Image: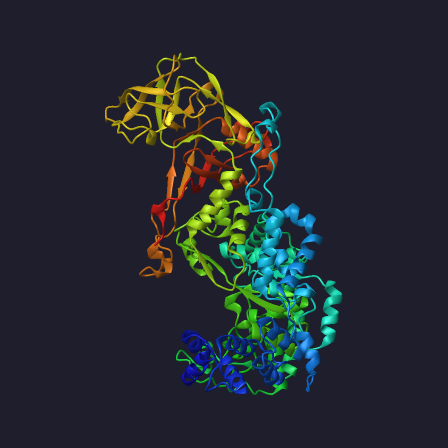
Amino acid sequence: MDDLVPIFVKIGLSEQKAKDTAKNKKLAPNLEAVIDEAKVRDAGCDKDTGNLLYQLASTISKDALPHRAFLVSKIMSGDLKTADQVSAGIKYVEDVQAPIDDAAFNEATGVGVTVTPEQIKSAVAEYIESNKANIVENRYRVLGPSLANTRKLAALRWADGVAVKNQVEAQFLELLGPKDERDAPQKKKKKEKKEAAPVEKKKKVEEDKPVNLSSMFFEGEISKLHKPGGNKQIKPELMEEHLKATGGKVMTRFPPEPNGYLHIGHAKAINVNFGYAKAHNGLTYLRYDDTNPEAEEEKYFTSILDTVKWLGFEPFKITYSSDYFQELYELAVKLIKKGLAYTCQCTGEEIHAHRGGDDGGARTACVHRDRPIEETLEQFEKMKEGRYKEGETTLRMKMDLENGNPQFWDLIAYRVLYTPHHRTGSDWCIYPTYDFTHCLVDSFENITHSLCTTEFRQSRESYYWLVDAVEVYKPVQWEYGRLNVTGTIMSKRKILKLVTQNHVSGWDDPRMYTLVGIRRRGVPPEAINSFVLELGVTLAKSTIDVLRFDAKVRDYLDKTVPRTMVVMDPIKVTIENLADDYLEWVSVPNMPRKPEMGEYKIPFTNTLYIDSSDFREIDSKDYYRLAPGKSVGLLHVPRPIRCVQVKKNDQGKIVELVCRYENEGEFKKPKTYIHWVGEAPTVGSPVKLDEVRLYEPLFHHANPDDAEGGFLNDLNKDSLKIVKGAIATVGIYDQIADWIKKTGGKDKESMRWQFVRTGYFCLDYDTELDLSKKDNVKAALGKIVVNRTVTLKEDAGKQLS
């Protein structure tokens, strides 16, 4: 096919795209035929025309194929000038017979229609005026949907897309002015001081609004998907029945296999499937693809549903592929009777060899492919009755071995398995494969948009082949780029190895990027959804730097969680000029500059603790924290302290600092304030934290699989540090009590804090909390364990290579 490369280059394709196209066994001959029909094999054509010819060759449907030459002539005559017109032309000729009515075609495809800039401006102005109230209220958050909606206006059907976009943006700017803080959903306006309620009249904290995901579905390729009823069927009555069942609603599904826990990549799939339906007032199924009884466990079913709800989505219905085992079996029989399936006794190695083997050689049919229908029916019945061993016989679909797409190489539809199924027990010993089940169950459930990741792109044609072969309703499959994050492992097999070899504590280890793992680490679901929203829905596979994910989490936590002071490595400080019984209650806000979040009080006495990192025995000009003879501020305390003596034990370790409280006369405002915890045993201060778990990346490099010897050799042995002996202020009790009151206290990881000057943390599941004593939090708490969710600031030294 190398001889096609220069021909493709002549119509404007880049060298690399020409080479890739020449290798595509389906596209290359189609594009060559289009070029010949356009009579530009030798002379070539301009790039714009070439792009339209390429679009025609790559997107033309089977039904439109007989009219390809007509469409080519329309492109070459200049009648079809845009990609939208070519798409409309393909759609029009799908439903007509030759000869084509030229006038009707021209009307359907906008031939000769010119939309002037004045007409664009007028149509956009009319749209904005009719939607003014909504636009003024929601501002730039509805810019994306407005762009999509204006493109659908009859007056702008054939207008230049860029010109329409520019005009919409210009009129938004004229109406609303430049973007400001109101257009950043994650930000809240600061309240005027005069509106701040006194502390004793605490206002209820306004909940952060849920992330608006809808805008991502009105931009880019996903915004161009068909409306319900717009996908052509092999029989018109199939669509009639479908629309009657759905009422014309968008129907999507999230179909996980219940053989493991969901990971960060699934968060995008959940958001895309549930979000797309929600944006179009549709419904979404949660469907468990439970066709492999050997790998499925009840704990996975429970965790998947819990995770979906944790992310903020509610399934329309919860279904199982196993609900349809009987219907699937009946369609397999129908496929056999149509001569489109056969029983096969080839081994896996033999099937691989017939498909061309490791060298990608010629594909050949096995000896069973032409088995008589009656014999196949008989053997399939024996499979169902359990008269074959596992692996001895399969049912394969008779597809197209000459097709360049591997998904047409006689895929397996059924295999024999004697493992009891978690729902159907031993009722079945034959189980359908994913390739047989997925599209048919989509059809049974009247899915309008089967949204999946791009690794299933080749499956789209076989998906359509099967539903048409058994003559059932055909959904539309559409693929988007999957989400990967650097420094992570997504493979269930590899994650299982980490768990079983005790490199991590379990599937929910906070170092893992399973959703149960990052949930345990304290990552809020809103931050995950916001992260997905920011990335959008594109066709490109994306690998996002983990630091970008951390930044999104940090940003959300900064705006939502209370502050408290925790000392990780305490040094005792005695204030020599305060009496032993001195006790002053200091007010501390849960969040600075947000009085509506309330405050708590902590004791300030003549004994307190600071972190060892905040003291240096040898001072320097660029050091602003505590040192001998030097003053430093204590957060929320009116005056600074000054170190006058350092006490050490016999081993030379610092055990106590003697300081003076500068509570007399004038004092110089310190350059730095440090956090502290007061000692006041009578009021339970300090609060001991039994464990503080500090998590670092589990792997050293961005792609652990690239490590010599495999991903296990890339493990970071210092990815977990456990701190014992950390102490917190008594304010932690008030904060936990408030959290229990608001949430019930069941999801411990949702008790989140910023440990001032340290990082963001949450309660771990190992924390002992007796909710029957919730009215007395101090008594209710036993062992206290916290996890670090993310550091206070991005550490450049932790950049994965």
Camera-nearest residue between 75 and 543: 75
As displayed, is residue 463 above or below residue 487? below
Residue 511 in percent (x, y) is at 43, 48
Camera-nearest residue between 270 and 479: 479
* Total numbered badges shown on the rendered structure: 0
Camera-nearest residue between 233 and 264: 233
As displayed, is residue 160 above or below residue 398? above
Camera-nearest residue between 308 and 391: 308
Q: Is 173 placed left or right of 264 in the picture?
A: right
Q: Is 664 placed left or right of 247 in the picture?
A: left
Tell me which residue sits at (48%, 52%) in the image: 514
Residue 152 in percent (x, y) is at 66, 63
Q: Quadrant of the C terminus?
A: bottom left
- Residue 765 appears in the picture as rendered: no
Residue 653 in percent (x, y) is at 26, 27
Residue at the limit of the structure toward the left, as seen here: 651
Residue 229 in percent (x, y) is at 70, 68
Res 429 quadrant in image = bottom right
Q: Quadrant of the N terminus?
A: bottom left
Tell me which residue sits at (59%, 64%) in the image: 161
Here the colouring is rainbow
- Residue 616 appears in the picture as rendered: yes
Res 293 quadrant in image = bottom right
